[in-house]
Structures are given as structure tokens and as C-alpha cells.
Amino acid sequence: MGKNFKTDFQEIHYSRKNPNFFLKLGLSLAEFGYSTAINVKNFLYDIKFLKEYETKLQVICVGNLTTGGVGKTPIVIELANSLSKERKVAIISRGYGAKISNKNPNIIKDNKGLKFQNGLICGDEPFQIAKKVGSEVVVITCANRKKAIELALVKYGINTVILDDGFSNRKVKKNKTILVIDSKMKFGNGHLLPYGPLREPISQIKRANEIILVNKGDEDIKNAISWAKKFNKPLKICEMQPKRIYNSQSGAEVKLNNEKAIAFCAIGQPQQFFDFASKFYEITPIAFEDHHKYTKKDINDLIKIAKEQDIKTFITTQKDEAKLIDLIKDIKNYSFNVLELENKLKEIE
């Protein structure tokens, strides 16, 4: 809870904290090694020494250049629901953070419904996606995208695959690549991992067919749009705004009265959630590491803090709710509320 290893690195990645000389030197050396490996990999794919797996299916990638928290999930959901009106669609996710192994394909949802009851087992993001896509959309997790694609084709007759977070994975040939960028965070300090948040050099934007700029309340959105236009790619903006707050235990929509609440989450960019939550509550913010697997102890610790501050309400994200369902369902005297966001996608001329 609170500050942690990942949080400290995010402070550096987004120029909110300067590393000391020795840490900076170590990060620079590590970045050089990472950069070399990434550039060699991309070069070998560019000259066709390494071969991409080609399939007769339509393959659409929704990815990002940086580490998590840019807002891909709602875009994947909207894209799948739109395409499924005319095509047989499968979403393939790596399943990061799941308890189940992702070495072989796991069917999270098919046309008969969900196969898991919460995101702790199968992963928070694929579970959230599976709950929100249409009944005919298949959701599969697997580290080996080729295996997952072949399963989707043979078992379900899929003709369109959406690769969730597949930009850095060049093992599968894509028909279209959509690059998602956070309008406010952009590329942070511009450095590659571990010194910065970039998984790939900025030059690799050349592999994208389209950019979607995600706006989560960015007050400087006009300048962000101008910045994104310099990459000379078709550009869309995804406006993300609060839709409603509901109680996770009952499902009922919550009536707000500007009360105190503990806002907690385990997402890539927690401050953006806290900014949204503070519009509705007087919050005490608590951040866990991205993809943190919640335990009963975590919930007990949160309740202890709530008792100390005489707070009866918690607010979290839908991504976090996916991992909390079984842990909070029997808790009395405390409300675990969820902030649901909605997104509006529009093209930028």
C-alpha cells in the first residue's frame, strides 16, 4: 500500500522525481542494454530474418509504446463490439497477472458465457473485457499468440482477431495496428525501460496505422492533439469521463453526497483515477502496484485505515473490482463502490 517499488520508478519515468547520480548511471546502462536488444529484434524482423506468423484471419493490434495505464481496455471492448456485428471476433490477451498459467490458451469467455467468476484467477483486464463485450465475442488469454489464434480459428471459426497489448510482439503479422497514447502522460521522460516508460523507441510509431489519443481529463488537450499530429498518422481521440458510481456488493447506483471515501486502485496511472474520484468524494488515496493480486489482508488493512479515519465508503475502478468480488461480497457496514467510465471516440481532422 502507498509508495512502492513501481511507484518510485513511475515518479522517475514521468519526470516527477530525479534519480541520484548512481541510480541515473545504473538506469542509463540498463536502458542501453534494453535498447540494444529491442533494436536488434526489430532489425531482424525488418530484414525478414525473423519471420512473422501469418494467418488468413484479420488481425488487429491495439497496443501502446509505454508501460501500462494508457486506456486500451475500453477501446478494445468498443472495437470488438463494433466488429462483432458483422464478423466473428476473438480478443487475445496475454493474461498478465493471472493465477492460471498462460503458457497454453485459456478460454475466458465464449458464446456460452464467462468461464471464470473473478479476475484474480484469469487476470483483471481480460475479465473486465469479457464482462463487457457482446455475447458472441470470444476472449482468450495466452502468452503464445499463435496458439491462441489457431484455437480461435479451429474451435470457434473466428475470422477476426484483436490482439490486446500486442504492439511489441512481432511474432504475429498484423493487418492493422492501433497505437494508444495517454494525452497527458505521453511518453514520459522519453527514455526506454527501465530509465523511462517506453517499451519501444519512439521511431517505431512507423509500424502503427492509426493513433488513438486517450483523454482522461487533460486540461491541455489541444496541445496534446497538436503534438500527436506530428507523427503523421490518422488520429482519433477517446474522451474518457465518469459515467456512474455503483455499489459492487449490490450493483445499485450510488447517490452521492460529497462524503469522505478511501480511493484505492492497482492500475498503471493511479493519479488519474484519484483525480476522477476526487470530483465526487473527499478522498484518502491509496495505490497498490499495477496488477496487484488483492488478498483478505489487503481488505482488512483498508478497513483498518477506514476505521481510523471514521470512513465508511471505498471507491475503486472496474479493473480492480474484477479481483475484489469474492473478497468483499460478505463485508457489512462498509460500501465498496466502483467508478465506471465511458468513452467517446471521434476522428480528428
Image: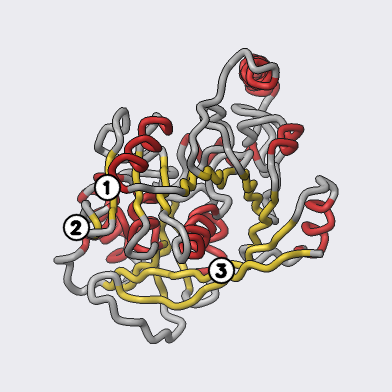
* 140 vs 336: above or below: above
Q: Is residue 95 left or right of residue 204?
A: left
- Look at label 3 and name its amino acid: Asn
How many C-alpha atoms fall within 10 Å of the one at disc 1: few (<14), some, or many (≥20)? many
Circle number at residue 120: 1
Numbered marks: total? 3
Task: First in sequence, mark 3 or 1: give its number.
Answer: 1
Q: CA distance from mark 3 to mark 1?
A: 25 Å
How many C-alpha atoms fall within 10 Å of the one at disc 3: few (<14), some, or many (≥20)? some
Closest to the camera, between mark 3 and mark 1, is: 3
Circle number at residue 163: none
Residue in the picture at 25% in, 54% down: 118
* 69 vs 332: above or below: above
- For mark 2, what is the residue? 326
Task: First in sequence, mark 2 or 3: give its number.
Answer: 2
- For mark 3, what is the residue? 343
Q: Quadrant of residue 260?
A: bottom left
Task: Decide which of 268, 123 is in the foreground and name it.
Answer: 123
- Look at label 2 and name its amino acid: Asp
